[in-house]
Structure formats: structure tokens, C-alpha cells
Amino acid sequence: MATRILIVEDEGWAVDSLSEMLSDMWTDDFTIEVKATVRDAIDWLTKHKADLIFMDVHLGDGLSFDIFDSIKVKTPIIFTTAYEEYALQAFQNNGYAYLLKPFDQEELHAAVAKVQPLISRAQHSSAYKNRFLVKYGVRLKSIRAEDIAYFMAEDKLLYGFSVEGEKFIVDETITKLISKLDPRFFFQINRKFIVHIQSIVEMIKISRNRIRLKLNPDLVDDIEVVVTEEKSNEFQMWLDK
């Protein structure tokens, strides 16, 4: 996934210099959008999302801090400016670094290193399914992936169970679904079950390489939930990450 970078800067030389330094240091694919005014930045951020923002303080139509009076920006920001006196205000507005012009490659690299984990985490989570639209007769409900305790395949259907015990049909096969779920939280323990890590209440070894799980909410009809021998080592490594 390409990293989307927004540069809010009204000086052409500064845009060119920053773009060149980013090209030299960025190892993955990335794209750059450039906006020169407060108004244009607000308009772009209202319609789009960036992974990282570089923002000058003084723009042609005001201070970049005016942007935050109009919209909420959650993206990490690296401020770039020739003025020292705005540092505190910058860090109060989602600033993770404050670079004084002219800055060099080493300073830029150190600033980007601070936000790189945030970018990776955001991109990682957005690559997986976050919500499920489910049907209850004529009613529809959107359930967050984090609110799903486990999935169970039964009678050629796949069911999801919420943490509140609601049961619903998922229009997927278990094989296709597992690739769409965040592997930090979901694991397919056998051909029948995908479990969320928070749903596991108890684990009991029932043989050398088989583990029986107790899940919350409880399953009806005394259905046994067992990690297969083939999955056991991988499952234990997943729990130990």
C-alpha cells in the first residue's frame, strides 16, 4: 500500500526540496499531494485522508493552525517552518516533530522515524475488514469486527457471534473470511472456527498437540472447540506474540 503524503506549503523551493529528500529516503511506494493555502488544505482533508502531513506554519491566507478550527485532523503532522515560536502550538495540534528551515536529510529522517510506526499501524489495520453489515429479517445492523467473539461454520453456513451473544449469518466461506480479518486478533483454529483472542477464556491441553478452548460467550449444545494438531504450534506462537 502506497503511503499518501500531504505537503501543506506555499513556497515552491520548499516543496521541491522536501519532495527530493523524501524520494531519497523513502523505501516504499508513496504519493505526494501539495496544497498551498489553508482553504485548499481544508477542502482536500475534508474529502481525502493522508497517512502523513508536512505542514508549514505561515501560509498565504493565514496560519496553518487555522485548519484545526475547521476540521479535526488525526493524521500525524511534521511541522516545517522558519519560526521557532510556534513549537508549543504545533505539538498541541497533532504535531510529532518540528523542523526549522532549512533542515537536512538527517533531521528529516529522525522526524519521520517518530511517526513511521503510527503510519504502519494505521495502514495495517485499514487493510482488513473492520465492520460487518448483518441482517435480522428486515432489520440491518453494522457490527464492528472487534465486537465479534468468533465465527463458526455449520451446515454449509458461516455464523458470527458477537460478544453480546448475538448470532448472525456471514455471507462468506470460512476460508475466504480469514484472509480479510486482522491476524493480530483472529485465528482459524480448525475447519469450523475462527476465534478472536479476547473471546478465549480457558485453554486445556487434551493431548500432546490438541488444545480445547472455552469461549465467551458460551456455545450451546456442548459444541467442543478444539485447536487441531496441525494448528497447535502456530496457535501458541500467535498467543505469544
Image: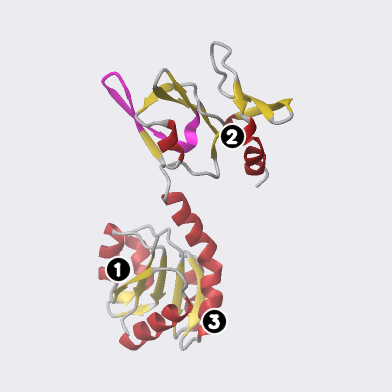
Taking the spot 54% from the left edge, 62% from the top edge, the residue there is 117
**Looking at the picture, does residue 152 appear above or below residue 12?**
above
| Residue at the far top in the pictured view | 221
Residue 82 in sight: yes
Q: Nearer the viewer, residue 53 or 166?
A: 166
**Looking at the picture, does residue 12 appear above or below residue 208?**
below
At label 3, which amino acid type do we have? Glu
At label 2, which amino acid type do we have? Gln
Secondary element at tag 3: helix
**Crowding near the residue tagged with mark 2, few <14, some 14–19, many ≥20 C-alpha atoms within 10 Å:** some
**Crowding near the residue tagged with mark 1, few <14, some 14–19, many ≥20 C-alpha atoms within 10 Å:** many
Residue 27 position, x and y percent, is: 47, 72
Span shown in magenta: 133-150
Does residue 237 appear left or right of residue 12 in this picture? right
**Crowding near the residue tagged with mark 3, few <14, some 14–19, many ≥20 C-alpha atoms within 10 Å:** some
CA–CA distance in space, label 2 to label 1 = 40 Å
Answer yes or no: do the residues labelled 2 and 1 have beta carbons within 8 Å? no
Residue 194 position, x and y percent, is: 51, 32
Residue 204 forms part of the magenta stretch: no
Residue 202 in sight: no
Answer yes or no: do the residues labelled 1 and 3 have beta carbons within 8 Å? no
Residue 147 forms part of the magenta stretch: yes
The residue under label 3 is 107
At label 1, which amino acid type do we have? Ala
Q: Nearer the viewer, mark 2 or mark 1?
A: 2
Q: Nearer the viewer, residue 2 or 39?
A: 2
Label disc, if present, on residue 198 of the rendered structure: 2
The residue under label 1 is 41
Does residue 170 appear left or right of residue 124 in this picture? left
Nearest to N terminus: mark 2 or mark 3: 3
Does residue 145 appear left or right of residue 210 in this picture? left
